[in-house]
Amino acid sequence: MFYYMTQILGDVPGGNLFNYITFRAGGATMTALLISFILAPWMINTLRNRQGRGQPIRADGPQSHLTTKVGTPTMGGLLILLASIGSTLLWGNLQNIFLWIALLTTMGFGLIGFADDYSKLRGHSSDGVPGRVKLVLESLIAIVAIIFISANLPPELATSYAVPFFKDLLLPFGLPLYLIAGLIVIVGSSNAVNLTDGLDGLAIVPTMIAAASFGFIAYLVGNAIFANYLQVHYVPGTGELAVFCAALIGSGLGFLWYNAPPAAVFMGDTGSLALGAALGTIAIITKHELVLAIIGGLFVLEAVSVIVQVASFKLTGKRVFAMAPLHHHFEQRGWAESTIVIRFWIISVVLALVGLATLKLR
């Protein structure tokens, strides 16, 4: 909105600053943080009063959660969504199609997560919307997003994946396979973040680290000079996604203030599904789909741990991990919650640095 207003008003003192993505990204971060701090006390109290017993805790999960986390309200993802989307609408260029694709996809997955959280609260159970129903809804939103992304990418990139560490190597899929591959990225990323969200502060910090990394990537990929220097594929318009990523960081920081141990609120599926979808969508738009598996490697590990656990139990009747997802395995091994969270944050930082290194190592 601010960008659009300066374009209409013309020569306004200081108005030229709004032409710079970096300035608007900084503004988006601070605005999202401010919105979070303003809304959080009221929202947390409202959620607590309306939810009563708070988020249902898994009976088969770590037994300590049944005493330490009981009564904590969920749906804190609403705070993240309101702050990040509101800030992006204020600071972003609303004529940018990629920005709208990312925003609407995030909102769509957030609605699915909200329905799931509401179902759990209403039924006083950790079982929400049936998994197949969620998967179908997520797939529909993802397919629509991928079609719009493909239609607005340069022709040579429209149905291809770029391979990290190689400057010109593209994996051409064709539209049908590209839809399937994109579906895996968006839906997989969404559910991987959801699986990671099991301890106070565990999911939000790696999400902010990934958002910061992809904000940087989006800015470089959307700049012809930087893209040519780094020998990455130039995608006009992606720089505006840096504003959205910056807003995610600001809202994440605001949420973390209240999600830090002991958490006053959980993000729930409302937040985790939306944030994961946002990262997957941005990765596809910037042609760094495979790099997402590196930067978001912690989410991948959490998801793989669940897949391995289920597959092993069904095939052999034995479990590989004491409990899945992976963070619960370490809880069962006696690690303190804070130890797991901080060490996983460190892993996220290292993986982000490796992912960013692919920009130059070509």
Image: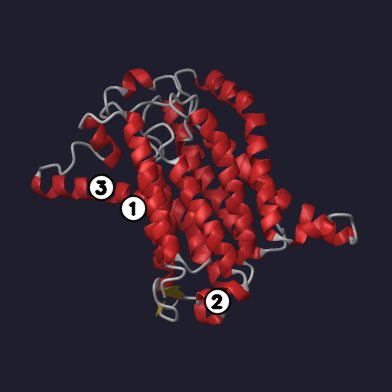
Is any part of residue 85 visible from this angle?
Answer: yes
Q: What element carries label 2?
A: helix
What residue is shown with label 3? Answer: 305
Q: Position of residue 243 (x, y in %)?
A: 64, 54
Q: Position of residue 264 (x, y in %)?
A: 49, 24
How many C-alpha atoms fall within 10 Å of the one at disc 2: few (<14), some, or many (≥20)?
A: few
What residue is shown with label 2? Answer: 229
Residue at 36% across / 34% down in the picture? 127
What residue is shown with label 1? Answer: 300
Where residue 16 sits, quadrant-wise, is bottom right
The CA span between labels 1 and 2 is 30 Å
How many C-alpha atoms fall within 10 Å of the one at disc 1: few (<14), some, or many (≥20)?
A: many
Q: In this view, does 315 lie above or below 65?
A: below
Mark 3: which amino acid?
Ser
Q: Earlier in the sequence, mark 2 or mark 3?
A: 2
Q: What element carries label 3?
A: helix
- 334 with respect to 22 (left or right): left
Q: Is mark 1 on a helix, strand or loop?
A: helix
How many C-alpha atoms fall within 10 Å of the one at disc 3: few (<14), some, or many (≥20)?
A: many
Q: Earlier in the sequence, mark 1 or mark 3?
A: 1
Residue at 60% across / 50% down in the picture? 246
